[in-house]
Amino acid sequence: MRNILILILISGIWSCKPEKTQVQNFATFTGQQVTGVTVSDKGRVFANFPRWREGVKHSVIEVSEKGTSTAYPDQEWNNWKMGKTVSDSVFVAIQSVVAFENILYVLDTRNPLFKGVIDSPRVFAFDLSTGQLIKTYILSKESFHKDSYINDLRVDKKNGKIYFTDSGHAGIVVMDIKSGKSFRVLDNHPSTLAETDHLTFNNGVWKNTVHSDGIALDTQNDVLYFHALTGYNLYALSTKKLITENNKEIEESVKLITKTSAPDGMIIDSSGNLFFADLENQKIMKLDISSGKISVVVEGEKIKWADTFSIYKDELYFTNSRINEAKGDISEMEFSIHKIKIN
């Protein structure tokens, strides 16, 4: 009998399936399409809502652990409406928020409703201890085009730079943190151009052409990764080459890393894994950069256009922006921030 019991127990252990990754809802927004999320070193969560349509209540918010939100840094910064005066004390069309050390970088495309850049794109840098604006970075005229949509950014402390993708007009922008000077590289280069004009989902074909979008910085190996949204190739470039401002040398240094699914945002964890979405198949993927192995982290109905990623204490936060579904009136649609354990 004892041997039989042991066999039953062993059989039970070996037949157990691995526990599925649990997707935890962090916050939900009705009628407000969230795209960006970032978590500070102290666990504070910030999110943003792009001005892709009328009716944006707030451009930037801070979200509490209970899922409630407040305008950040205050209501005045979030009061701008179409047709109002544009200034350096209002958010016009925010596409990304990135918390790095004790600063929140707020990227303003200055391209509301995708109707063209109405003022130079800029980044507002806020001190997270005080909520005060400490610097405004304005992209130089040579760094963007009228149809630019400066999409996302990464901060490179080692080289004192900020790197941006432009999804409206293919290219990468590099800005010096100290001087604020910026320059543009890989303008309409094959590595930054979209590869297709559509993506295919269960609910139909999403027709759009989106260039360089996802961006991730490997600070251990000094490599910048980037990817067109409507595309299936992941590229990389040494930051040492990138900051030279030598366009020919930069273009020759671009490397095709691997074929992937079509993603939006990307991020690298401390172990050197690159996380990105498989938008068309409702998945979040992981690339082990050292081995080249790609695996599924999580999939299913709770993944609805995983847009932007942020990592805090081995948890991956992501937004469900539902871009392929958000057509016409979105007042009753729910958009959300979720998180999953990755270690």
Image (cartoon, rainbow, N blue to C red):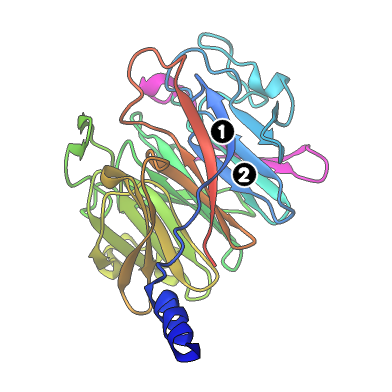
Q: CA distance from mark 1 to mark 2?
A: 11 Å
Kind of residue sitting beneath label 2: Tyr
**Count the marks: how many?**
2
**Residue 14: percent from left, percent from top:** 39, 78
**Residue 122: percent from left, percent from top:** 55, 36
Label number found at residue 287:
none
Which of the 4 quarters of the picture holds residue 76?
top right
* Residue shown at the point (40%, 20%) measured from the top left: 113
| Left-right relation of 199 to 90 | left
Q: Is residue 276 above or below residue 80?
A: below
Q: Is residue 147 above or below residue 232?
A: above
Q: Nearer the viewer, mark 1 or mark 2?
A: 1
* Residue shown at the point (71%, 51%) measured from the top left: 43
Label number found at residue 48:
1
Kind of residue sitting beneath label 1: Asn
Q: Which residue is mark 2?
A: 105
Which of the 4 quarters of the picture holds residue 289?
bottom left
* Residue shown at the point (37%, 73%) measured from the top left: 15
Q: Is residue 55 visible?
A: yes
Q: Earlier in the sequence, mark 1 or mark 2?
A: 1
Quarter of the image for the C terminus: give it: bottom right
* Residue shown at the point (53%, 18%) measured from the top left: 56
Q: Secondary structure beneath disc 2?
A: strand
Q: Is residue 114 above or below residue 208?
A: above
**Residue 33: percent from left, percent from top:** 48, 26
Part of the protein shown in magenta: 112-140
